[in-house]
Amino acid sequence: MELAGKRIVLGVTGGIAAYKAAELLRLLLKEGASVQVAMTEAATHFVTPVTFQALSGRPVFSDQWDSRVPNNMAHIDLSREADVLLVAPASADFLAKLAHGLADDLLSTLALARACPLLVAPAMNRQMWEHPATCRNIATLRGDGVDILGPGCGDQACGETGLGRMIEPEEILADMVAHFQPKRLAGKRVLLTAGPTFEAIDPVRGITNLSSGKMGYAIARAAREAGAQVTLVSGPVSLPCPQGVTRTAVTSALQMHAAVHHEVAASDVFIAVAAVADYRPAKPIGHKIKKGTQATPPQIELLQNPDILAEVAALRDPPLCVGFAAESENLAEYAENKRRTKKIPLLVGNLIHDGFGGDDNTLILFDDEGQHPLPSAPKLELARQLVARIASLLEKRR
């Protein structure tokens, strides 16, 4: 469980998105957190305290004069027991209170008196979000070190569409998990590739490599959790983009090649996880090839695709380059040879049968210091270990 042992105060303010806070509470609990809910009076008009009490197994606080707290100082006691204060949804009114240091109810007083980090998930109409006063308040809060989660863009309860809606509970959960991860790559820019490429023979056929993209997407998430600005160049996969990651979708190796070279100059780290097809048809056919009754198999001339990782590693001032090698045998020999041939500081190797298409994997890291086995584990856990190794190599480059 990602949040085992973490103590969270969940603040709920008045807005239609308050109903989503119940699902958010359930997700936080499922990941092992203990959650204490505090509501504004306005929030109780949308969802009753009974709902949150039933889900959390704890009394819900909304009154700063609540006598259930022995010293009558709920705003002090609740924050002192918390690892983080999360307000979701955070209304425009509540954000204005935070920005100006107002403390006229339990939740705003708790936020002002807190001794823990504060994260807020804004939720409001698009005009309210875009209003200059709200923009100033958000800028003030960011300057005060408050983490702003979202907002999202889409349909709103008022019938309009645009920025301002609260991001989904699953996205807030991902941000909460990321909050507790060490920020080993803070301020760094990471570029990585993931998934397969598809080289068209005709409109319905092509050459590809099998790849689920799961390892690459896990690394993108882990790098973002570590504080990096992450750009993911992805071949065709059926995976959602990790929260907070910028994704560029491509199909072919040449498209991936162009996308990488467009971004690489601004990157501190390049991680080549994608299973790029080695060859492409020289002349893709614009119509579907018909087999026919007497037809002979078509002759397909192939051209070699560019070696994206080797090109990036050979730049005059390259980022720290990390490669991947998936082998069916002789992993140590082939992986180390690939690392030395491409002249890269770190290569990640695995046997195909250990993790192909699944959620777990077994890796070996190859660098100048030798081999570093990573035992079988979920891909996200392995990705976080890889990110830690990358961070240590970046430190040595200084």
Image: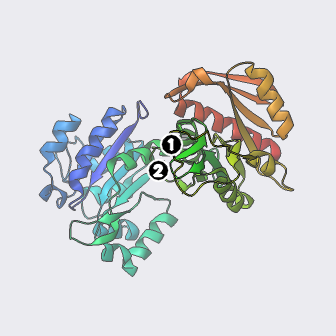
**Quarter location, residue 68:** top left
Q: Earlier in the sequence, mark 1 or mark 2?
A: 2
Residue 273: where, in percent of width, then height?
64, 40
Q: Is residue 27 above or below residue 44?
A: above
Color theme of the render: rainbow
Element at label 1: loop
Residue found at the far front of this picture: 294
Count of picture labels: 2
Residue 386 visible in the picture? yes
Identify which amino acid the numbered label 2 is placed on. Answer: Gln
**Closer to viewer: mark 1 or mark 2:** 1
Instruction: Compare residues 393 and 208 and report the one nearer the observer.
Output: 208
Element at label 2: loop
296 horizontally vs 307: left or right: left
Q: Which mark is residue 243?
A: 2
Residue tagged 1: 292
Q: Residue at x 15, y 43 (%)?
A: 51
Q: Residue at x 40, y 81 (%)?
A: 132
Neighbourhood count class around disc 1 (C-alpha, 10 Å): few under 14, some 14–19, many 20 upward? few
Q: Say if mark 1 contacts mark 2, CB within 8 Å.
A: no
Q: Which mark is residue 358?
A: none
Instruction: Compare residues 371 and 173 and report the one nearer the observer.
Output: 371
Residue 212: where, in percent of width, then height?
52, 36
Neighbourhood count class around disc 2 (C-alpha, 10 Å): few under 14, some 14–19, many 20 upward? some
Residue 64 visible in the picture? no
34 horizontally vs 3: left or right: left
Q: CA distance from mark 1 to mark 2?
A: 48 Å
Q: Residue at x 49, y 64 (%)?
A: 142
Instruction: Compare residues 180 and 166 and report the one nearer the observer.
Output: 166
Residue 1: where, in percent of width, then height?
41, 29
Residue 278: where, in percent of width, then height?
71, 41
326 horizontally vs 320: left or right: left
